[in-house]
Image (tube, grey):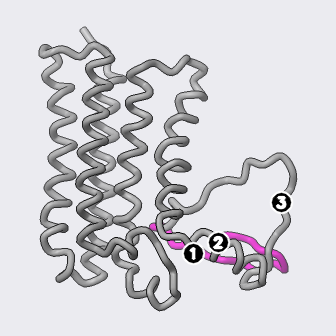
Amino acid sequence: ELRYHGDAKLFVPVERLDLIQKYTGGSKPPLDRLGGTTWEKAKTKVKAVAGADWIINLLGFGTLTPLAGWASTGEPLTVWGWFLVWGFGALFSFLYPLTQLYQFDEDQRRGDRTFALRLGKRLSLGVSIACVTVAFGLFVAGARAAGWTGADVGRWGALVVAYLAWLALLLPWYRQAREWAPARHQRGMYLALVAWAVTDAAVLFGWAWPRG
């Protein structure tokens, strides 16, 4: 539930909560009137440039969120820690377009210019496959920087399982992107969240589980 000027409320679906973050400015921000001039300007400013939505999510959620989590520990960021931060940035950069595919028709009716809409369904999924490969490449670089060796079979295996989980979802989705109905794309998005959870578990096991 988002509150606007004049006690207006905007209810956001659970699957779109990734688009909301807490205001952390020093002063109390002015509230826009829902549907008013300043509200429309703020909404249009981001969606007028295709790709702005993707960059905001890549940096704001994908990169700064794990960076803030690490900072809260008070520990200095290690080399392998930077690889993880960049890896999750790449991971979120391909997850975000997946959340937009089932909304193509609605976005077109509203005149929105999201990154996924500009690319189209099939190319968006192609970018997603490329980004997930980059993400896991960064995880592998982080593992090497952390001193993983051939003896860490379980840790390497966890990363491989997570990567294969993404490919098992994305490759069929890519091949059938044009034929799938919005409901099927939405189901794919939910399955992507499951693959994300598998990735989180693999990273936790790989770096947080005691060695030796």
Position of residue 83 measured from the top left corner of the image (x, y, whole percent): 38, 29
Category of crowding for the residue at label 2, using alpha-carbon neighbours closer than 10 angstroms: few (below 14), some (14–19), many (at least 20): few
Residue visible at 60% across and 20% down in the picture: 74
Residue 45: give its label. Answer: 2
The answer to whether the residue labelled 2 contacts the one labelled 3, judged by CB atoms less than 8 Å apart, is no
Tell whether label 3 touches label 1 (CB within 8 Å): no
CA–CA distance in space, label 2 to label 1:
6 Å
Q: Is residue 186 left or right of residue 162?
A: right
Disc with the residue nearer the chain's start (2 vs 3): 3
Q: Is residue 209 above or below residue 162?
A: above
Q: In terms of image quadrants, where is residue 21? A: bottom right
Disc 1 versus disc 3: nearer the observer = 1
CA distance separating discs 1 and 3: 23 Å
- Residue appearing at x 21%, y 26% in the figure: 155
**Overall secondary structure of the magenta stretch?**
loop
Report the mark closest to the observer, 2 or 3.
2
Amino acid tagged 2: Lys
Where does the image place residue 93, in percent across and percent down from the top left? 40, 53
User: Which element is circle 1 on?
Assistant: loop
The reply, left or right, for residue 127 in relation to residue 35 is left
- Relative to 73, does residue 180 appear above or below in the rendering? below
Q: Position of residue 210 (x, y in %)?
A: 32, 15
Distance from disc 2 to disc 3, alpha carbons, whole Å, reads 18 Å
Question: From the viewer's perspective, is 80 left or right of 165?
Answer: right
Residue type marked 1: Ala
Q: Residues within 10 Å of mark 3 (few under 14, many from 20)?
A: few
In the rendered image, which residue does mark 3 sit on? 29
Determine if the magenta segment contains residue 44: no
What percent of the width, then of the height, locates residue 112? 51, 80
The answer to whether marks 2 and 1 mark residues whose Cβ atoms lie closer than 8 Å is yes
Q: What span is in magenta?
A: 1-15
Q: Which mark is residue 48?
A: 1
